[in-house]
Image (cartoon, helix red, strand yellow):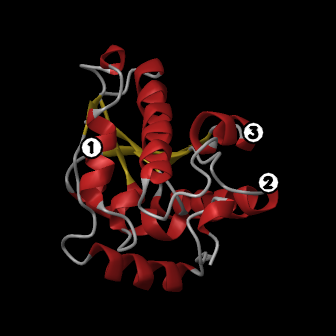
């Protein structure tokens, strides 16, 4: 089965791609991250994700960068929310909707996300965001509820990112999450 992997970054996806392939999936990495605060940071992370896709032999697609849309659709009114709060829920839903729309438009049966590999993200919150997507986006594609933290996913992502020389960022991407 073909699966779209919403890819938050190369390091996180570095644990997800081999697992999906090992589970028998054909993978398309989708870099859909208008939440990233600057075009420069977006391009840097996109290049690293594309580097991983080439190394692992999977298809790579990047959606256009539109941070103004993300600020308007996701962050407006939620700028002061803490990490793991309502802004993050909205961001997950926004990016997962982009992945679902891409999958549907390209006849791909399912989608998932690399966001769940991070110990800084609550997988159940991500799964709830996927479940809250408009019913018009379902039944196909289906969302694969995979917690990539399990089976030492984060540990593998750190190891593979280091082996491949992938840039590992210190914040999720939006200006509200900077340390």
Which comes sooner in the sequence, label 2 or label 1?
2
Query: Residue 132, position in %: x, y?
Result: 30, 32
Mark 2 and mark 1 residues within 8 Å of each other at the beta carbon: no
Q: Quadrant of residue 169?
A: bottom right
Q: Secondary structure at mark 2?
A: helix
**Disc 2 target residue:** 39
Q: Secondary structure at mark 3?
A: helix
| Disc 1 crowd, CA 10 A, few/some/many (<14, 14-19, 20+) | some
Q: Quadrant of the N terminus?
A: top left
Point out the frontmost of discs 3 and 2.
Answer: 3
Residue 128 shows which numbered tag? Answer: 1
Q: Quadrant of residue 147?
A: bottom left
Residue 42 higher or lower than 14, as above or below? above
| Disc 3 crowd, CA 10 A, few/some/many (<14, 14-19, 20+) | few
Residue 61 higher or lower than 119, as above or below? above
Q: Quadrant of residue 139?
A: top left
Which comes sooner in the sequence, label 3 or label 2?
2
Residue 95 higher or lower than 97, as above or below? below
Residue 109 higher or lower than 123, as above or below? above
Q: Residue furthest top?
A: 136
Residue 79 shows which numbered tag? Answer: none
């Amino acid at each position: 089965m073909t699966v779209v992997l919403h890819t938050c970054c190369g390091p996180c996806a570095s644990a997800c791609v081999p697992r999906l392939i090992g589970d028998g999936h054909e993978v398309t990495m989708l870099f859909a991250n208008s939440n990233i605060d600057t075009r420069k940071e977006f391009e840097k992370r996109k290049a690293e994700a594309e580097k991983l896709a080439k190394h692992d032999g999977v298809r790579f697609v990047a959606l256009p960068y539109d941070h103004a849309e993300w600020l308007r659709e996701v962050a407006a009114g939620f700028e002061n929310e803490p990490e793991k709060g309502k802004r993050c829920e909205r961001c997950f839903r926004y990016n997962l909707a982009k992945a679902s729309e891409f999958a549907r438009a390209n006849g791909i049966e399912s989608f998932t996300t690399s966001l769940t590999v991070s110990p800084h993200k609550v997988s159940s919150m991500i799964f709830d965001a996927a479940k809250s997507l408009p019913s018009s986006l379902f039944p196909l594609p289906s969302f694969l509820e995979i917690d990539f933290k399990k089976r030492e996913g984060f540990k593998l992502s750190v190891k593979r990112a280091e082996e491949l020389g992938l840039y590992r960022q210190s914040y999720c991407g939006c200006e509200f999450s900077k340390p």
